[in-house]
Image (cartoon, grey):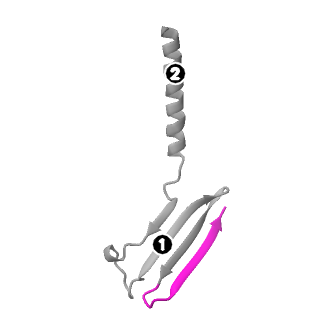
Amino acid sequence: MRKMLLVALGVVLVVVDIVSVSAQTSDPRTGTWKLNVEKSKFSPGPPPQSLTVKVEPSGQGEKVSTEGVNADGTRTAGACQQE
């Protein structure tokens, strides 16, 4: 019984270790980032009305896409792929 308990404990520790390693390998830059205009300073010129940047893994690199609205109300968008 004691041997079985030790084996079960070992399996649990291995699983916890694997999960923690996989959590650490995720890139903290990935995600959606939204500009908080009220907390930002812009010099020179007026600030944009909004800006959102999305970073997501793609193959061996990442894909970065942006969407925003300039100060004059014109919409902007762009994307690039980095390998």
Residue sticking out furthest to the front: 1
The secondary element bearing badge 1 is classed as strand
Amino acid type, label 1: Thr
The disc labelled 2 sits on which kind of residue? Gly
Whether 77 is among the magenta residues is yes
Q: Nearer the viewer, residue 33 or 41?
A: 33
Q: Where is residue 31 drawn, in percent x and y?
A: 50, 61
Residue tagged 1: 52
Image spot of residue 21 (x, y percent) = 52, 39
Q: Earlier in the sequence, mark 1 or mark 2?
A: 2
User: At 50% from the left edge and 26% from the top edge, which residue is drawn?
Assistant: 12
**What residue is disc 2 on?**
10
- Residue 46, given in percent of the width and then of the height, sits at 38, 87
Compared with residue 51, is residue 56 higher up or lower down, i.e. above or below? above
Residue at the (66%, 55%) spot, across then down: 60
Give the vertical position of 37 relative to 21 (above or below).
below
Pointer 2 local density, CA inside 10 Å: few below 14, some 14–19, many at least 20: few
Which residue shows up at 53% across the image and 31% down it?
15
Which residue lies at the image location 47% right of the left edge and 83% below the top edge? 69
Q: Which residues are magenta?
A: 70-83
Q: Can you name the residue that lies furthest to the bottom here?
A: 72
CA gap, disc 1 and disc 2: 45 Å
Q: Residue furthest top?
A: 1
Q: Quadrant of residue 41?
A: bottom left
Instruction: Reply above or below: 71 against 62.
Output: below
